[in-house]
Image (cartoon, rainbow, N blue to C red):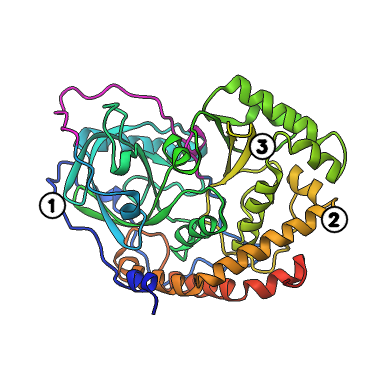
Amino acid sequence: MNSLLLALLACTTGVAISLNDTGPAATTDSTPTTTDDTDPGTTDETDTPPDDTETTGTDDGGTDSNPPADTAVEQLPDAPDPGSLDELFGDEVIEIRLTIEAEAWADLEEQSNRANSVGAEFYDFTYVEASVTYNDLEYGPIGVRIKGQGSYQPIWVKASLKLKFDLYDEDLRFLAGLNRLTLNNMSNDYSMAHERIAYRAYGTAGVPASRAGHAQVYINDELFGLYTVLETVDKDMIRARYDSDEGVLYEGWDVDFYPSYVDDFELEFGDDTYGRQQLALAANALQSGSGQVALDAADAYIDIDQFLRFWAAEAVIGQYDSYPYSSPGDDYFVYLDPADARFDFIPWGNDETFYSPDSNVTSAYGSLAAQCNRSSACQERFAEHVWEIMTLLEEEDWLAYYDGVIEQIEPHVLADTHKSYSNNTVAQYQASMRDFMEERAQKLQQWVGPRP
């Protein structure tokens, strides 16, 4: 057995730290419904779980504006850095403990009630003050807010959360200088393993992507269950993947590379005037001809081969919820890399991967994919990327990695009474996910041709 699998099977968690329970106890109308063995339904190629949009901006129902710090709460000293991101996103289930004071908890309850009333997609969640303890070290005050639209759940059930470490103290950082962290509730991922496996696959493929792991999350000493702990796409993440973070980052949220969508890309950071100028030039270039002519013109503004790599990785893991499988599309970022003044694609929102094994991976409607499908040379290059990625995943034995992850998280899945589906459902979807992975190479041949 290789060392990676041994590490996975260790199933080690972080040290449990006892914090004072300063938040309010759950009220009777806020108690989460415990799960039973009722199966919410199966998923096939035409019936996938509801859409979940994961973002770092306001489209997940939140804002990154800085509220005033509560002067009545003592500012904690900066905690020393206990490790690196390899520790945070490594091959262990870590433990994260949040402490949220009564007033802040009541604020989150009120925000949840309002979101329940108007719909999470129409509600702008805001940060409240909290502290977080990880590996015996307490960090605070930090900002915490609810996130999610299709994945939204109220705070007293199992809310997805954003942590912002520098919200109240611009010098406060988490591990390795990290200033943001995402905790996803996996409400649309019935296997509870999609994101960790998917983001690792992107990394193996050489696509710039966040790192993901699993965490047991406690709030005021109550176990709220197993979460995906995810690296937020921000300057820290860009700096770790590129030579410079001085470019321009946009989130793709129901947009495509057509002139009419240029104003709708959501700026995360950078020179917006310059960035939108480049978006407009890219969109115009894609409409300047058909097939390879348009792609050659657009390659001055979009790294077309990098896009094909991104798309091929999506094809291998079945990320049909993202661009270019829909137009307009979402669940992606584009970064204008100052090194070559071209846009690269960065994945996001991978909770609904590994579904729909029989969907044609070339049936994509985004403008870039549509032009590629009109060019035999581009289709051939896409197929090359697909098979290169498939080979890389097989060489690192992604099935063994999957088996290790599933064995590792099993006790944490069983202990998670806040999840909205049954343990039987988790087992069913984990088995389906493994079948997807095991049969993927055979399925891909139907659409991209025989393996070289």
Is residue 287 shown above or below 412? Answer: above
Q: Decide if residue 38 is in sight here.
A: no
Residue located at (76% from left, 66% from top): 447
Tell me where residue 423 appears, x and y as whole percent.
Answer: 39, 71
Is residue 56 in the magenta section? yes
Secondary structure predominantly adopted by residues drawn in magenta: loop
Is residue 348 shown above or below 435? Answer: above
What segment is highlighted magenta in the picture?
Answer: 54-78
- Quadrant of the rendering where the N terminus is positioned: bottom left
Q: Distance of mark 2 from mark 1, alpha carbons? A: 61 Å
Sequence-wise, the earlier of marks 1 and 3 is: 1
- Number of callouts in the render? 3
Tell me where residue 365 appears, x and y as whole percent.
Answer: 75, 48
Q: Decide if residue 102 is in sight here.
A: yes
* Residue occupied by mark 1: 18
Is residue 70 in the magenta section? yes
| Of the two numbered discs 3 and 2 in the rendering, the one whose residue sits closer to the viewer | 2
* Residue occupied by mark 3: 255
* Residue occupied by mark 2: 376
Label 2's element? helix
- Going by the numbered disc 2, the residue's amino acid type is Ser
Mark 1 surroundings within 10 Å by alpha-carbon count, few (fewer than 14), some (14 through 19), many (20 or more):
few
Contact between marks 2 and 1 (CB within 8 A): the answer is: no
Residue located at (56% from left, 72% from top): 394
- Going by the numbered disc 1, the residue's amino acid type is Ser
Tell me where residue 314 appears, x and y as whole percent.
Answer: 62, 56
Q: Distance of mark 3 from mark 2, alpha carbons? A: 26 Å
Mark 2 surroundings within 10 Å by alpha-carbon count, few (fewer than 14), some (14 through 19), many (20 or more):
few
Label 3's element? loop
Label 1's element? loop
Residue located at (34% from left, 40% from top): 178
